[in-house]
Amino acid sequence: RKEVEQDPGPFNVPEGATVAFNCTYSNSASQSFFWYRQDCRKEPKLLMSVYSSGNEDGRFTAQLNRASQYISLLIRDSKLSDSATYLCVGDNYGQNFVFGPGTRLSVLP
Amino acid sequence: SQTIHQWPATLVQPVGSPLSLECTVEGTSNPNLYWYRQAAGRGLQLLFYSVGIGQISSEVPQNLSASRPQDRQFILSSKKLLLSDSGFYLCAWSVFGNTEAFFGQGTRLTVV
């Protein structure tokens, strides 16, 4: 079983739509979680950290459910520029990071 | 502010040739350092991580090796490249305690 799992997509949504991604993790000892964004042929860049209480940054909202071991990312009012691959990340016993395979999003005009 | 430098950006190497990729971090001390590889259309695979000078942990068996000769320098090497070594190699750093990781711009390696 993969440590961090994501639906690879692609998610094709029209501009202005709301889209949600889920991610599940297997390591119950993981403490830190993040969402990264990766554009084609570029390095991943941190989008936001994920806290148990949930956190919001503009159009983006992240949630962590420790009991069910899943993480979510909600994007409201999608923009063309949101098209990218979104990577879910958890820490591995505090020593390194485990990345999910990514979910590809295409926002269409 | 902290910055991470990784070079070269692209590299084409013949099978059997050696490899050396270098990564340096500025603006922080004693960072955790990581090498990841991303095959085309795939997720990131952790290759090596280091919590200090000379301390290297390997995540997967392969013909690659890593070294950390200085606090903010991380090197990925191979004595003889294989075709399967082709991929996008990413260096990253984080502070102790695993707050978020920051990535270099990556090296796209093609073994021919």
Image (cartoon, coloured by chain):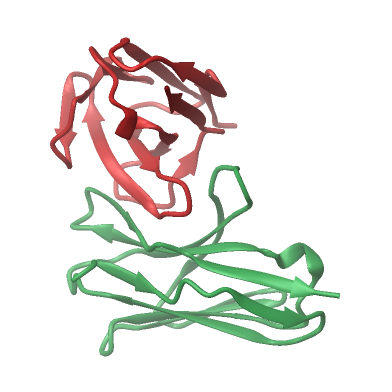
Residue A2 higher or lower than A55, as above or below: above
Left or right: where A12 falls relative to B96: right
Name the residue: 41% across, 45% down: B39
Q: Which quadrant does the C terminus of chain A fall into? A: bottom right
Residue extending furthest right? A109
Residue A40 pos. (x, y %): 62, 50
Residue B65 higher or lower than A90, as above or below: above
- Numbered circles on residues, count: 0
Name the residue: 80% across, 68% down: A80
Q: Which quadrant does the N terminus of chain A fall into? A: bottom left
Question: Could you say which quadrant of the image residue A59 lies in?
Answer: bottom right
Left or right: where A37 falls relative to B66: right
Residue B107 higher or lower than B81, as above or below: below
User: Residue B57 versus residue B10: which sits nearer the camera?
Assistant: B10
Left or right: where B1 falls relative to B58: right
Residue B104 pos. (x, y %): 52, 33
Residue A31 higher or lower than A95, as above or below: below
Question: Could you say which quadrant of the image residue A85 lies in?
Answer: bottom right
Task: Tell me what hue chain B is rendered in.
Answer: red
Task: Tell me what hue chain A is rendered in.
Answer: green
Name the residue: 29% across, 58% down: A91
Residue B38 pos. (x, y %): 41, 44
Residue B31 pos. (x, y %): 35, 32
